[in-house]
Amino acid sequence: MVKNFAKLFAVTALGMTLVGCSSTPEVDDSYKYEEKKQSAGETSQGSANLSMTNNASDLDANKAPAEMTNEQLKAMLRGKVVYFDYDRSDVRAEYYQTIKLNAKYLNNNPSAQVTIAGHCDERGSREYNLALGERRALSVKNALMVEGISADRINVVSFGEDMPVVDGHTESAWSKNRRAEFNY
């Protein structure tokens, strides 16, 4: 009985995920910017050099040379994250190249595992933000699975609002904290 309920729950969750992923995400170009030098009061944990660009020209997985070593590919991935709109967990089109590059790395390294950490800004209750962070991480996981990565190689974790990359109570700070990070 419990197994049947678990199967029903899994099928329902998968169906809801597929329905949620069936729409074309809106692209908001306002997130395509380079982080300029910030005053020490605005930065946290050395984030002054944080790059917010994930443009296709920066991360074209198809242009990565075949002779590129796994270490070079991993270096390209370092610091690349997926950012989300306020109160949303759908992956925006501009971040699919980041996901494809991570999938390429995972395909080249069959024993590698990835943990996707979902994060939120400080708005909302702690419980709500933990759930939203998990939905964000699961959206990225689903996108990796579409690229051929097995679900058992992808772990998800949510930190909610507990690990901001930038402290502050402004939209600029909040937009940098609404993210999913890849950890190998």
Image (spheres, helix red, strand yellow):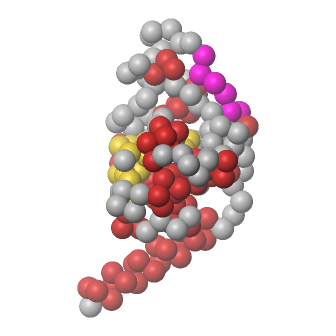
Q: Is residue 112 visible?
A: yes
Q: Against 4, is 28 above or below?
A: above
Q: Position of residue 87 (x, y in %)?
A: 55, 46
Front residue of 102 and 128: 102
Furthest-left residue in this view: 2
Q: Position of residue 98 (x, y in %)?
A: 58, 47
Q: Position of residue 165 (x, y in %)?
A: 43, 29
Q: Give the residue displayed 53% in from the left and 76% down from the top.
A: 15
Q: Against 110, is 74 above or below?
A: above
Q: Is residue 130 visible?
A: no
Q: Is residue 136 left or right of residue 97?
A: left
Q: Position of residue 81 (x, y in %)?
A: 51, 41
Front residue of 62 and 58: 62
Which quarter shows the N terminus?
bottom left
Front residue of 123 and 111: 111
Magenta segment:
30-36
Q: Give the residue displayed 35% in from the left and 43% down from the top.
A: 159
Q: Give the residue displayed 61% in from the left and 71% down from the top.
A: 19
Furthest-front residue in this view: 67
Q: Is residue 122 left or right of residue 38?
A: left
Residue 169 part of the magenta-drawn span: no
Q: Is residue 131 left or right of residue 30?
A: left
Q: Against 97, is 28 above or below?
A: above
Residue 35 part of the magenta-drawn span: yes
- Our reading of the magenta stretch's main secondary structure is loop
